[in-house]
Amino acid sequence: MSPSTSLLEMVAPIEQDLLAMGEALAAELVTDDPAVAEMVAHLSRFQGKQLRASLLLLVGRASGNQAHEMPVVAAVVELIHLATLVHDDVLDGAEIRRQLPSINTAWDNQVAVLLGDWLYSRAFARSTGLTFPLASQILAHTTQAICVGEIRQALGRHRFDATPEEYERIALAKTGVLYGAAAELGVRYGREGQEELGGKMRLMGQDLGLAFQIADDLLDIEGEQAMVGKSVGTDIDDGKVTLPVLYAWRDADSNGRRAIEAAYLDPDCSDRRAALFVACDLDQGCRRARARADELIVRAQDRLLQLPSGEIRHSLERLLKFTLDRSS
């Protein structure tokens, strides 16, 4: 069974909600400016698994949330995610996204940054039109956290002595918080008295998002561009010391550490990813990082027990596992 087939089966209980979400998202991407419309048409081909929207809708269904605007809230979350993708490709210098030229490649960095800003503005304009202000409030705080996470990561380039805990704080901010917000909104949007369960689902989503980021870092090191569907090796080229490399650096002796640093810093190195595998036991670093992602998914599964058992919770459990098993 292919990953795409299994994902379709996972989200089957919310198929109609996802279709409504897609319609709401498409409506927000309509513009009468021909230049922006051309970029948005290109961007629309990047839309992939829609995991954050699926998480929101599944948690909402499992917790008994009947709010009719849930698909629109999910669309706002996906708009924010699209904005982060466009900005991430600029920050990473990535040239490929879903086997297509990234926005910064097809146009340029300046245009890509501005398109990402446009997407954020569309997301918040739509959120302010929702019946309940909770979505705007949570997503505003979430977007602030994402920006802070990206700033911390940019300032931490080539920091080989960072701790795994520091890495996780940054990864939680830049990736985990949006998953957490989606899960919390699934419970709380349009309902009073759901703060406790919403908080627990936020933590579940954050665990999922952090595991997703670790899996993404592993794909950047171990993956092949044709399979992953986007540029690989960009973290290393950009000086980002991700969890597998941190583990390898901490396990290495002084010679190994110098070799790792040289793989990042040598201006004449043409393949930094290959140089890293020569410099240290990066396979062991990847194994340790994968084990940490497994721990996070197990913890997220435990948190899911707060939801009623049944088909929807089972779909959520499968969604958690899918995060680690994905190849793109």
Image (cartoon, rainbow, N blue to C red):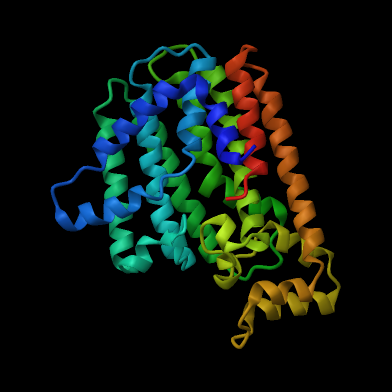
Query: Residue 56 appears at what percent x and percent y?
Result: 48, 27
Query: Is residue 324 visible in this depiction of the protein?
Result: yes
Query: Residue 311 appears at what percent x and percent y?
Result: 60, 15
How many tags in the picture? 0
Instruction: Reply above or below: 292 against 36.
Output: above
Query: Residue 191 appears at what percent x and percent y?
Result: 41, 13
**What's the residue at 58%, 70% (across, down)?**
239
Instruction: Reply above or below: 35 against 129.
Output: below
Q: Quadrant of the N terminus?
A: top right
With 178 as the anchor, is 2 left or right in this view? right
Q: Quadrant of residue 140?
A: top left
Q: Quadrant of residue 103?
A: bottom left
Task: Give the residue furthest to the right.
Answer: 253
Instruction: Reply above or below: 56 against 225.
Output: above
Task: Give the residue furthest to the left.
Answer: 32
With 69 as the anchor, is 269 left or right in this view? right
**What's the residue at 66%, 71% (across, down)?**
273
**What's the residue at 31%, 36% (across, down)?**
25
Q: Who is closer to the viewer here, 247 or 47?
A: 47
Query: Is residue 134 visible in this depiction of the protein?
Result: no
Q: Who is closer to the viewer here, 9 or 81?
A: 9
Q: Quadrant of residue 53?
A: top left
Query: Residue 238 appears at what percent x and percent y?
Result: 54, 70
Task: Give the residue furthest to the front.
Answer: 1
**What's the residue at 44%, 40% (across, down)?**
142
Instruction: Reply above or below: 195 against 29.
Output: above
